[in-house]
Image (cartoon, helix red, strand yellow):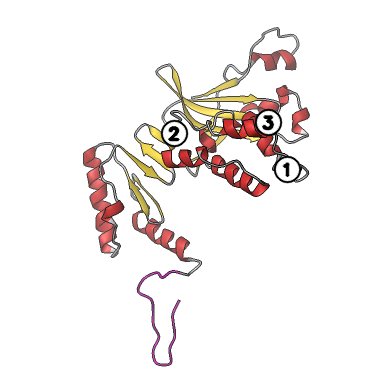
């Protein structure tokens, strides 16, 4: 934007408040400045720099600070943190072991008052959905609340809604943490279904334990709730059953992973092929090499 007077044409020397395009313009500027460098992530004026050890972290920090200095960008030392084991970034606590919801965000959910209308309920569910990748089996708990979000349902806050609201506040309580995705490690995809929703969890097998990377879930509409559970599990991740390919969205990058047919739920085979008498129990587990 160029303010024009009768005498001379002026140009702003810095980005001023009030421009609708200011946030994306600033983000593009930061991305061009430090985006190509490894171990560096940025969102507007928040910059996260990581390293495998202190020496690598120091080297990357020196590089980023040099670039910011060359571009005449200053930093606020009062709110900056250096050489820490974990840091809060965009609502998450990031450390070497993975990421977890920030305690301040968890407290905000736990201290939310009982909603009195649909707008307040929508705000609460939106805040809870921000951490959807950390929620294990939330659809059964949230079913009474999600039911109130339908257009044809009148507001009626009963005992089931009160219980669902109270229970949902504890979905993020405890040590809920997710590991970082490692393309060099094998994957285990576990899917399950109920009468109200479907869910899946992607894990890395480490030393005999399954370390979760992400949880995913979805509610079923009225038509899907009439399906047999045999057809609900393929609905969770259709490519797993059809073409043997998992399309997993992680960190804004789409990974195409070939699935090796693992020991899928034997109960499916017994129903799809009556001659097979094997029995099993859900959930379905597919190993990805």
Give the CA separation, mark 1 to mark 2: 41 Å
Judging by the rendered image, the residue that carries numbered circle 3 is: 160
Q: Residues within 10 Å of mark 3 (few under 14, many from 20)?
A: few
Q: Look at the numbered disc 3 and give the secondary structure of its residue.
A: helix
Tag nearer the camera, 2 or 3: 3
Asked if one can make out residue 245 in the rendered structure from this viewpoint, the answer is no
Q: Which mark is residue 181?
A: 2
Asked if one can make out residue 44 in the rendered structure from this viewpoint, the answer is yes
Dot 2 or dot 3, earlier in sequence = 3
Is residue 4 part of the magenta span, yes or no?
yes
For residue 197, side relative to residue 53 (left or right): right
Q: Residue furthest top?
A: 277
For residue 94, side relative to residue 190 (left or right): left
Residue at 35%, 74% in the rendered image: 13
Give the CA separation, mark 1 to mark 3: 13 Å
- Residue 177, image x and y in percent? 44, 31
Q: Is residue 78 above or below residue 141?
A: below
Q: Residues within 10 Å of mark 2 (few under 14, many from 20)?
A: some
Judging by the rendered image, the residue that carries numbered circle 1 is: 155
Q: Is residue 11 above or below residue 85?
A: below
Residue at 46%, 42% in the rendered image: 105
Dot 1 or dot 2, earlier in sequence = 1
For residue 64, side relative to residue 287 (left or right): left
Is residue 283 part of the magenta span, yes or no?
no
Q: Look at the numbered disc 1 and give the secondary structure of its residue.
A: loop
Pick the front one: 192 or 183 = 192
Q: Look at the numbered disc 2 and give the secondary structure of its residue.
A: loop
Q: Give the range drawn in magenta.
A: 1-17
Dot 1 or dot 3, earlier in sequence = 1
Pick the front one: 76 or 65 = 76
């Amino acid at each position: 934007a160029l303010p024009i007077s009768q005498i001379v044409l002026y140009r702003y020397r810095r980005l001023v408040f009030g421009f609708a395009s200011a946030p994306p313009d600033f983000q593009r500027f930061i991305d061009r400045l430090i985006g190509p460098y490894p171990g560096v992530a940025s969102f507007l004026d928040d910059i996260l720099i990581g390293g495998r050890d202190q020496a690598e972290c120091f080297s990357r920090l020196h590089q980023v600070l040099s670039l910011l200095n060359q571009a005449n960008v200053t930093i606020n030392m009062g709110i900056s943190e250096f050489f820490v084991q974990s840091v809060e970034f965009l609502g998450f606590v990031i450390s070497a072991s993975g990421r977890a919801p920030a305690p301040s965000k968890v407290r905000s959910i736990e201290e939310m008052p009982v909603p009195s209308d649909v707008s307040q309920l929508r705000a609460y569910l939106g805040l809870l959905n921000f951490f959807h990748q950390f929620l294990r089996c939330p659809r059964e708990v949230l079913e009474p609340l999600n039911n109130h979000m339908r257009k044809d349902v009148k507001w009626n806050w009963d005992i089931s809604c009160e219980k669902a609201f109270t229970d949902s506040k504890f979905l993020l309580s405890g040590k809920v943490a997710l590991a970082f995705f490692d393309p060099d490690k094998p994957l285990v995809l576990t899917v399950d279904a109920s009468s109200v929703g479907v869910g899946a969890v992607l894990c890395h097998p480490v030393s005999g334990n399954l370390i979760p990377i992400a949880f995913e879930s979805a509610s079923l509409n009225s038509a899907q709730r009439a399906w047999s559970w045999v057809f609900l599990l393929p609905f969770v991740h259709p490519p797993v059953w059809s073409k043997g390919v998992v399309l997993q969205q992680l960190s804004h990058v789409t990974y195409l992973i070939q699935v090796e047919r693992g020991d899928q739920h034997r109960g499916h085979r017994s129903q799809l092929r009556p001659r097979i008498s094997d029995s099993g129990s859900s959930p379905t587990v597919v190993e990805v090499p």
